Image (tube, coloured by chain):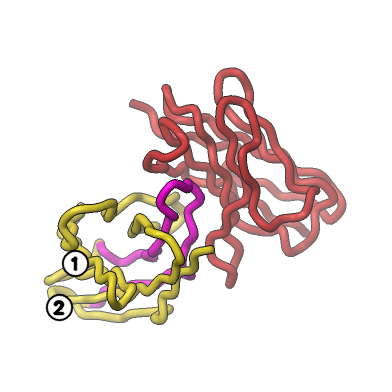
Chain colours: A yellow, B red
Amino acid sequence: AQSVTQLDSQVPVFEEAPVELRCNYSSSVSVYLFWYVQYPNQGLQLLLKYLSGSTLVKGINGFEAEFNKSQTSFHLRKPSVHISDTAEYFCAVRAGGGNKLTFGTGTQLKVEL
Amino acid sequence: EAGVTQSPTHLIKTRGQQATLRCSPISGHTSVYWYQQALGLGLQFLLWYDEGEERNRGNFPPRFSGRQFPNYSSELNVNALELEDSALYLCASSPGPFNEQFFGPGTRLTVL
C-alpha cells in the first residue's frame, strides 16, 4: 500500500516570494507522483506529474517538482507566487501498474500582498 | 472538449435517506472513479468502474455503491445516510485504467 504525507497544512507566503510545498511518500513498489490544485468550490486540476525520466518536472502556472527517490520526496516549488496561486494543493501517488490515486491531506497555500 | 460533469452541484438530505450522485465522463473515457473529500479526512478513493464493471473499491461500507452505464456515465448511491457522509464527492475519468485522471467539479452532499 502507498501513503502520502504533506506535513504542512497551511503555508502563508507573500506575493512574489518563492514557495515550497513538501510531499513525502511511502511505497513498496515503484510509483507515479502527481500534484493537483483545488481552487475554492472547484474540482482538482493536474499541475504536474512524474512518471519516469528526468526527476525535475515542470508543470502549469510556473510550478515545478523534483522527484527524489532516496528521500522518497516530491516537493512542489514556485520561484515567485501570485495572489491567484492561493488554493489547496494535493500530492498524490499511484502505484506502478495500479490506478488508484492515494492523496495527501493537502496544503493550503495562502498568498498575501 | 467538454470536461467531466457532475450533478447535482449540491444535495441536501437527512439521516437515513438515500442519495444519488451522477457523473458524465469526458467523451471517449471508459474509466470512472469516485472519491470522497470529507473535512479533516482528505481525499479518499471510493470506487472505480471500467467498461461497465466495478473494478476496485476503497475502504467504505457496502451502503456506498454505484454503477456504470453503457455510455460510460456513472452513478454513486449512498444508502442509509449518516451525518459523516457529508462531503464533497469528486468524480474523475480516464481514457483507460492506467491513464491520467481528469476530475469534475464535485457534488457537495450535506446530511442533516
Is A86 within the magenta? yes
Is B107 within the magenta? no
N-terminal of the pair, mark 1 or mark 2, is: 2
Q: Nearer the viewer, residue B100 or A40?
A: B100
Q: Residues within 10 Å of mark 1 (few under 14, many from 20)?
A: some
Q: Residue at x 47, y 37 (%)?
A: B97
Q: Which residue is mark 2?
A: A17
- Please state the horizontal and vertical placement of residue A54, each as a whole percent of the image: 15, 57
Tell me the tag on residue A82: 1
Amino acid type shown at disc 1: His
Amino acid type shown at disc 2: Ala
Look at the numbered disc 1 and give the secondary structure of its residue.
Answer: loop
Quadrant position of the N terminus of chain A in the picture: bottom right
Q: Residue at x 63, y 58 (%)?
A: B87
Separation of marks 1 and 2 at Cα, in angstroms: 8 Å
Q: Does residue A83 appear left or right of residue A43 in this picture?
A: left
Look at the numbered disc 2 and give the secondary structure of its residue.
Answer: loop
Q: Are marks 1 and 2 on the same chain?
A: yes
Q: How many marks?
A: 2
Residue segment shown in magenta: A85-112
Chain that bears disc 1: A
Decide whether the magenta segment is chiefly helix, strand or loop. strand
Q: Residues within 10 Å of mark 2 (few under 14, many from 20)?
A: few
Q: Is residue B100 above or below residue B16?
A: above
- Residue reaching furthest to the top: B70
Image quadrant in which you'd find residue A65 = bottom left
Q: Nearer the viewer, residue B61 or A14?
A: B61
Chain that bears disc 2: A
Q: Residue at x 65, y 36 (%)?
A: B54
Q: Is residue B29 above or below residue A46?
A: above
